[in-house]
Amino acid sequence: MIEKRVELAKLTTIHIKGQVDIKVIENLDDFSKLPESFTVFGNGSNLLVKNRNRNFYKLSDKFSYVRIEDNALICGASLKISTLMRFLIENSISGFEFMAGVPATVGGAVFMNAGAFFESIGDKILYATVFCASRGIVVFEKDKLNFGYRCSNLNNCVVIEAGFLYNRVDKNFIKEKIANNIKTRLAKAHLTNTFGSVFKNPLGDYAGRLIEESGLKGFTKNSAKISDKHANYILGSKQTDIDDVLFLIDRAKEMVFKNFGVELEEEVKIV
Ligand SMILES: Cc1cc2nc3c(=O)[nH]c(=O)nc-3n(C[C@H](O)[C@H](O)[C@H](O)COP(=O)(O)OP(=O)(O)OC[C@H]3O[C@@H](n4cnc5c(N)ncnc54)[C@H](O)[C@@H]3O)c2cc1C
């Protein structure tokens, strides 16, 4: 495995300040070298690094593949959703348009059960090949996989590959649906310099509404800012310190609890 020091600005979509050492997993044999406790990076689109001394790993581009086989859409875990979208259009494959504009990898999307527009990745899955610290490399069929609201039963596991159900429709229909979904996203929130939703929506409500009504839209701490477009988004840049982002997260939790008695739960993974 290659070990390298990488800027968090390159590893995370909020492009935060700092560096970490990561080991790059190049092949299946490398999994046997993983320690008991580790953190794997996908595209860093829902990940904040507080403790830079953890055992960090990332799957190499060798795990970035997509093909159709036996009526399943098969994706390697490091495949980016943007690359997947291009494949889907080229091959007239429908069912994943809801993921357009989500800057994730397939592995991160499966682990988080990413979703939007009332659909989620777990609804489409047929199987996942995973490495689990306790069991080695195993294939979990759909009935062994549990998905909830932005969670799965894959803790302490690394998704290596996933197979999905799909259907074929006219490629213009797919193109149009993807374009519309991206347009909707852009109108409501941001596509860059953020990590998506900070908090899960509490039952029957929206975290963004509670934060906005707590007067925190546009609230800043140095270069970190609660978006003035969508209050459940935090924006940052290469100058942004993790402590400033964590400050905003704590402030939002504190104010929402004070104003509404609601305890917000982070969607973003803070490690
Ligand atoms: C602009 C923007 C829009 C977004 N919109 C949405 C949305 O509509 N819906 C939604 O659900 N999310 C959304 N997100 C959040 C984010 O894209 C998802 O949570 C996504 O699933 C994270 O994937 P990732 O590859 O970036 O994982 P990372 O952010 O790198 O990691 C997230 C978690 O997944 C784990 N992980 C990553 N890869 C693997 C793997 N191969 N095996 C096991 N665990 C892994 C990490 O250890 C971490 O715990 C958005 C984010 C941004 C920046």
Image (cartoon, grey):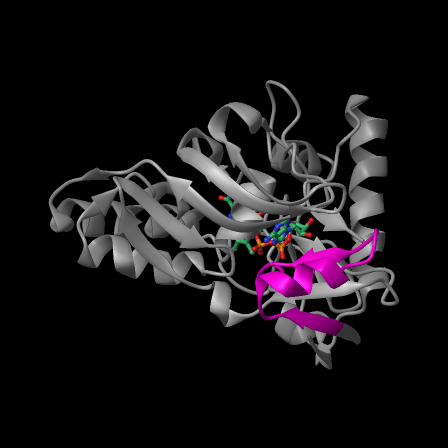
- Count of numbered labels shown in the rendering: 0
The structure residue drawn at horizontal position 51% and vertical position 41%, both measured from the top left corner, is 128
User: Which span is picked out in magenta?
Assistant: 22-44
74, above or below 116, in the image = below
261, above or below 128, in the image = above
236, above or below 204, in the image = below
- Residue furthest to the top: 204
* Percent of width and height locating residue 53: 88, 67
Q: Quadrant of the N terminus?
A: bottom right
Q: Does 60 lie within the magenta span?
A: no
The structure residue drawn at horizontal position 70% and vertical position 38%, both measured from the top left corner, is 211
Q: Does 39 lie within the magenta span?
A: yes
Location of residue 3 (image quadrant): bottom right
Q: Is residue 14 in view from this perspective?
A: no
Location of residue 198 (image quadrant): top right
187, above or below 261, in the image = below
Q: Between residues 72 and 261, which one lies in front from this camera angle?
A: 72
Q: Is residue 136 left or right of residue 255?
A: left
* Percent of width and height locating residue 240: 75, 70
Q: Is residue 151 left or right of residue 78?
A: right
Q: Between residues 160 and 17, which one lies in front from this camera angle?
A: 160
The structure residue drawn at horizontal position 78% and vertical position 75%, both measured from the top left corner, is 21
